[in-house]
Image (cartoon, grey):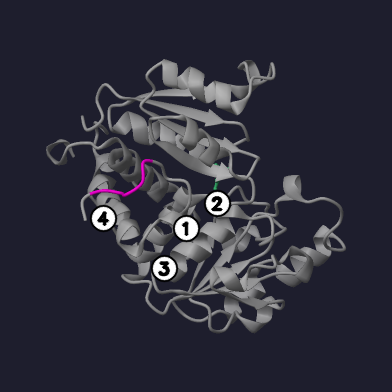
Amino acid sequence: MTGLRSKDLLGIADLTKEEIELILDVADSFREVSERSIKKVPALRGRTVVNLFCEPSTRTRTSFEIAAKRLSADAVNINVSASSIAKGESLRDTAITLQAMATDLVVVRHSASGAAKLLGDVMECPVVNAGDGSHEHPTQALLDVYTLRNRFGSLEGLKVAIVGDIAHSRVARSNALALTKMGAEVAFVGPPTLMPAEAEKLGARVFFNLDDVLECADVVYLLRMQLERQKGSLYPSVREYAALYGMNGVRRRAMKRGSIIMHQGPLNRGIEITSDVADTTDSLISDQVTNGVAVRMAVLYLLMGGGPDER
Ligand code: CP
């Protein structure tokens, strides 16, 4: 396989296992670019990548910008609060405007599920979903799968527990889809009020007690509490949530030898994870961030058709 079938990357649901493997293999070939003193290859010279982030982001926005620049593309970040979106311009008209400026690829983050698809339908150039509401965050799942493949060699039979606010989490959805396509076994763990109805359709087994999965999990993936998407009180208190579902030193010691901890960031320290667990070497949180650049370089490269001689 030499390319992706679709013009856009909107979700893991649209990718085959072979396409995921292609992205990971291309990411592997780009990883060493970030270790050079001059961190640049000419693969996308002369192309323009626009970052349109209508929700806050540190990791995803910055790594897409760095990825574009390491491929020699021009990266433009739209400051949404100072743009015409703030004056009421629709997403569709924003897309038409960017199209008229010969943009070569748009990366979009939006609070509405389906916003990336809307943009992809309007624009001729590729669109990458950098997180749409509680729907999907495909490049997060790809960098997570890439991080796990580097650590364990293969994901076949790997037991991954995804813990927390599953119902509002695009990261949980994209990861469940990517992990199961790659052969891992996925458990969703969280309070019933934060568990989506379609958990089993995503290929995940459901648990309400974190302590039931700790002994057999190879990976515990803590989710950020999506306070911005919750309506009303879905658990009694933050303190109670931390006691029942937070990863701490005691729970970490109950996990098996060789197991690892992941988190998509940003961390709510003391809620879903304590610092003594987050900051140890068997937590892969920094590796996830590092790998995000190589994976996003691969996505940009594959969607914009960079030549094989230019890597
Ligand atoms: N993991 C993630 O999407 O982080 P940001 O919100 O900082 O981009």
Disc 1 residue lies near ligand 1 with CB under 8 A:
no
Q: Residues within 10 Å of mark 3 (few under 14, many from 20)?
A: many
Residue 138 place in picture, x, y as percent: 47, 51
Mark nearest the camera among 3 and 1 is 1
Image-quadrant location for residue 212: bottom right
Most distant residue in the front direction: 121
Q: Which residue is mark 4?
A: 25
Residue 230 place in picture, x, y as percent: 78, 51
Disc 4 residue lies near ligand 1 with CB under 8 A:
no
Q: Which residue is mark 2?
A: 136
Q: Residues within 10 Å of mark 4 (few under 14, many from 20)?
A: some
Q: Secondary structure at mark 4?
A: helix
* Amino acid found under the numbered disc labelled 2: Glu
Image-quadrant location for residue 171: bottom right
* Amino acid found under the numbered disc labelled 1: Ala
Magenta segment's dominant SS is loop
Q: Earlier in the sequence, mark 4 or mark 1?
A: 1
Calculate the distance from the C-alpha at mark 2 to the C-alpha at mark 1.
Answer: 9 Å
Calculate the distance from the C-alpha at mark 3 to the C-alpha at mark 4.
Answer: 16 Å
- Asked if disc 3 and disc 4 are in contact, CB closer than 8 Å, the reply is no
**In this rendering, position of residue 96 left or right of residue 152:** right
Calculate the distance from the C-alpha at mark 4 to the C-alpha at mark 1.
Answer: 19 Å
Compared to residue 175, the image places residue 120 above or below, namely above
Tell me, for residue 181, which label it has, or none: 3
**In this rendering, position of residue 238 left or right of residue 297:** right
State the residue at coordinates (39%, 35%).
126
Say if residue 58 shows up in the picture. no
Tell me, for residue 13, which label it has, or none: 1
Nearest the viewer among 195 and 15 is 15
Q: Which residues are magenta?
A: 3-7
